[in-house]
């Protein structure tokens, strides 16, 4: 009786922590989303459009991650059709992040190294086209996973129920090859983009005589993109991390899996506001206004916000 009660309390506390962190992080991210949509001054700035897309993507990804985590305890067996849809969105949003980081790095590179062409190359319309392309590039591999299931399994599988976990539904060798090939291609392109833009902005900062502050900020921002990408990649090496720590602490399997889940899937969703939002005086001004309950009553004119 005591063992079952302890197990229930352990599961309850872990779910409470996951949901609590999810609510807190979503609230923080939501502040920046509200700040963006409440103030048209941001609508014409490519940098903020890409940033808020990253934040909204993080909110969706975190919601799905927390939902799947809780469902694995509350409703272990989930209909395959529903599970496929949830995993499709989760996979798409997960792969959106690195591509969005690459787009943000390119925008900073153009702003610093090609300022005369920034308005033309980074127009609002082109920014939304880029966001659309990001979703297409990431949704196709996710859709491919479902197509592989259709090819290898009878259609009736979508009427059955399974534990909703990627490997339980997408666990064939074809899925593994798809993940390796697509992720390797995307991450290689993103890393090359970040490295290229970082060193070009670094050169511009050294050569600059007037706007060294902007160049330095852009360089630091791209460097932070790289740090965020490294944390995003934790999801790919989580199985290896679990294997290592489970070998050291076999009696603490549940704790190890819970800890790696928090570090790899929940905490990184807080990085966008911490890395970009609180460093940016434009957005942070509105965040402070919202936290003091005055965002909806006070408007700052565009000419009051410094570039």
Image (cartoon, rainbow, N blue to C red):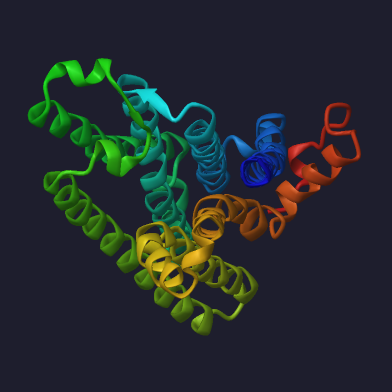
State left or right for residue 303 relative to residue 166. Answer: right
Specify the farthest residue to the front.
Answer: 1
For the N terminus, the image quarter is top right
Compared to residue 143, the image places residue 279 above or below, namely: below
Compared to residue 105, the image places residue 296 above or below, namely: above
Residue at 40% x, 54% y: name it.
Answer: 98
Q: Is any atom of residue 304 visible in this view?
A: no
| Residue 11 pos. (x, y %) | 61, 43
Q: Is any atom of residue 119 visible in this view?
A: yes
| Residue 194 pos. (x, y %) | 39, 67
Residue at 56% x, 50% y: name it.
Answer: 266
Q: Which one is nearer the viewer's eye here, 273 or 160?
A: 160
Q: Which one is nearer the viewer's eye here, 82 or 103?
A: 82
Q: Which one is nearer the viewer's eye here, 80 or 224?
A: 80
| Residue 111 pos. (x, y %) | 49, 59
| Residue 178 pos. (x, y %) | 17, 48
């Amino acid at each position: 009786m005591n063992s079952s009660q302890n197990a229930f309390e352990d599961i309850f506390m872990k779910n409470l922590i996951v949901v609590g962190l999810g609510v807190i992080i979503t609230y923080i991210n939501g502040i920046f989303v509200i700040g963006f949509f409440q103030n048209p001054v941001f609508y014409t700035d490519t940098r903020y459009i890409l940033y808020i897309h990253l934040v909204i993507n993080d909110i969706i990804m975190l919601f799905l991650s927390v939902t799947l985590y809780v469902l694995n305890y509350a409703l272990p067996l989930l209909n395959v059709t529903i599970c496929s849809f949830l995993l499709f969105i989760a996979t798409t949003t997960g792969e959106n992040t690195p591509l969005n980081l690459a787009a943000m790095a390119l925008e900073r590179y153009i702003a610093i190294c090609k300022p005369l062409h920034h308005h033309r190359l980074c127009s609002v319309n082109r920014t939304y086209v880029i966001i659309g392309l990001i979703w297409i590039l990431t949704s196709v591999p996710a859709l491919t996973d479902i197509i592989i299931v259709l090819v290898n399994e009878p259609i009736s599988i979508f009427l059955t129920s399974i534990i909703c976990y990627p490997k339980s539904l997408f666990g064939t060798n074809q899925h593994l090859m798809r993940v390796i090939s697509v992720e390797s291609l995307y991450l290689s392109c993103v890393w090359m983009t970040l490295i290229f833009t970082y060193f070009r902005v670094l050169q511009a900062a050294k050569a600059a005589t007037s706007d060294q502050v902007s160049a330095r900020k852009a360089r630091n921002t791209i460097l932070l993109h790289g740090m965020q990408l490294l944390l995003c990649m934790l999801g790919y090496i989580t199985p290896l991390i679990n294997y290592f720590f489970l070998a050291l602490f076999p009696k603490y399997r549940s704790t190890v899996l819970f800890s790696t889940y928090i570090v790899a899937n929940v905490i990184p969703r807080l990085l966008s506001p911490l890395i970009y939002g609180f460093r940016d005086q434009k957005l942070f001004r509105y965040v402070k206004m919202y936290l003091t309950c005055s965002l909806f009553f006070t408007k700052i004119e565009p000419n009051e916000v410094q570039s």
